[in-house]
Image (tube, rainbow, N blue to C red):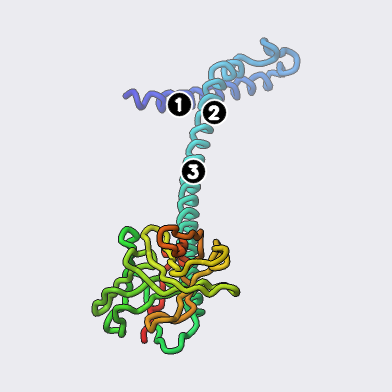
């Protein structure tokens, strides 16, 4: 019953308004008929009793009801518009997400194409066959990576692994379709190396030391300044004195060099030329 009270009040006000309107019309008709409309103005400022009653009784609640209905209508319209706005926002978010995904895929493809183009830049090496491979696993703790090629592709242990930036390492284990590579920083890695400088071509043995360093040992005591043999910033390449590695493949750059006072040999710390964290594709060189 409580829910029906506002409706009942509204109906009563409407009926009362109609009744008072009818009385007002009849009263004005009688006044006009008797000729008193101009000679005897109504009391209360010229407003007749029925009109005054309408102004006092009907207009305030009618205006309140009108304001309430206007508020409800505006609220309903706002609710509908808000729903449409939310739907539009969801649509825009979906479109933006799809475009971002498409952009990310395109960027990934562009990076892959760039890497493949860089790999194509690796020059052919006389006497070696190139087998392109993807890096499928990296273990920096053991200084090893795994490739998706193996004996089925003609890969065998001992093969050097390179990228355009330089030497990556050497194949040490081979399966039918996978192989494992010791990086140049692996403690068991060793290769004949040469200082690549116009006024110095000193040859030595480069060995991995773990982490991100290698050591080049030159088994010759310098007769003059150490910098005449080797100094910081010098490039170190493969010497080409063995049949395993081609000559001139960049291995790294000298960080510092010192003379071992006990043995008399020269030892230089070398930083790898290849950043393995950024390597995805490599070339295995096969005889």
Which SS class for mark 2? helix
* Disc 2/disc 1 C-alpha distance (Å): 13 Å
Taking depth in this image into account, of 251 and 109 the one nearest to the observer is 251
Query: In the picture provided, is 224 more to the left or to the right than 6?
Result: right
User: Label 3 belongs to which residue?
Assistant: 82
User: Label 2 belongs to which residue?
Assistant: 67
Q: Which badge, 3 or 2, comes first in the chain's sequence?
A: 2
Of circles 1 and 3, the one toward us is 3
Q: Quadrant of residue 245?
A: bottom left
Q: Which badge, 2 or 1, comes first in the chain's sequence?
A: 1
Residue found 35% across the figure and 74% down from its top: 170
Q: Quadrant of residue 206?
A: bottom left
Of circles 3 and 2, the one toward us is 3
Q: Sort mark 3 into few (<14), some (14-19) or many (20+) by Cα contacts within 10 Å.
A: few
* Disc 3/disc 2 C-alpha distance (Å): 22 Å
Q: Is residue 98 visible?
A: no
Q: Is residue 143 above or below residue 25?
A: below
x then y, percent, for residue 177: 27, 78
User: Label 1 belongs to which residue?
Assistant: 10
Which SS class for mark 3? helix
Number of numbered discs visible in the structure rendering: 3
Taking depth in this image into account, of 80 and 182 the one nearest to the observer is 182
x then y, percent, for residue 271: 47, 62
Q: Residue furthest bottom?
A: 127
Residue found 29% across the figure and 81% down from its top: 156
């Amino acid at each position: 019953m409580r829910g029906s009270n506002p409706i009942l009040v509204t109906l009563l006000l409407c009926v009362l308004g109609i009744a008072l309107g009818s009385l007002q019309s009849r009263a004005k008709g009688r006044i006009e008929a008797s000729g008193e409309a101009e000679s005897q103005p109504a009391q209360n400022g010229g407003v007749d009793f029925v009109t005054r009653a309408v102004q006092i009784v009907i207009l305030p609640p009618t205006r309140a009801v009108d304001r309430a209905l206007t508020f409800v209508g505006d609220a309903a319209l706002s609710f509908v518009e808000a729903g449409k706005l939310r739907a539009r926002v969801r649509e825009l978010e979906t479109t933006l997400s799809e475009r971002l995904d498409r952009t990310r895929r395109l960027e990934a493809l562009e990076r892959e194409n760039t890497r493949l183009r860089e790999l194509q830049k690796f020059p052919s090496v006389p006497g070696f066959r190139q087998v392109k491979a993807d890096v499928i696993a990296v273990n920096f703790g053991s200084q090893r990576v795994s490739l998706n090629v193996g004996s089925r592709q003609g890969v065998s242990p001992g093969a050097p692994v390179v990228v355009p930036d330089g030497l990556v390492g050497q194949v040490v284990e081979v399966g039918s379709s996978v192989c494992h590579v010791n990086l140049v920083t692996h403690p068991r890695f060793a290769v004949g190396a040469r200082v690549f400088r116009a006024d110095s071509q000193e040859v030595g043995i480069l060995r991995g030391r773990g982490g991100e360093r290698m050591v080049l040992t030159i088994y010759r005591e310098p007769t003059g300044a150490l910098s005449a043999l080797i100094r910081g910033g010098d490039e170190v390449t493969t010497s080409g004195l063995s049949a395993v590695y081609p000559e001139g493949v960049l291995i790294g750059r000298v960080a510092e060099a010192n003379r071992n006072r006990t043995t008399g040999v020269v030892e230089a710390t070398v930083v790898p030329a290849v950043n393995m964290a950024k390597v995805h594709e490599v070339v295995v060189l096969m005889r």
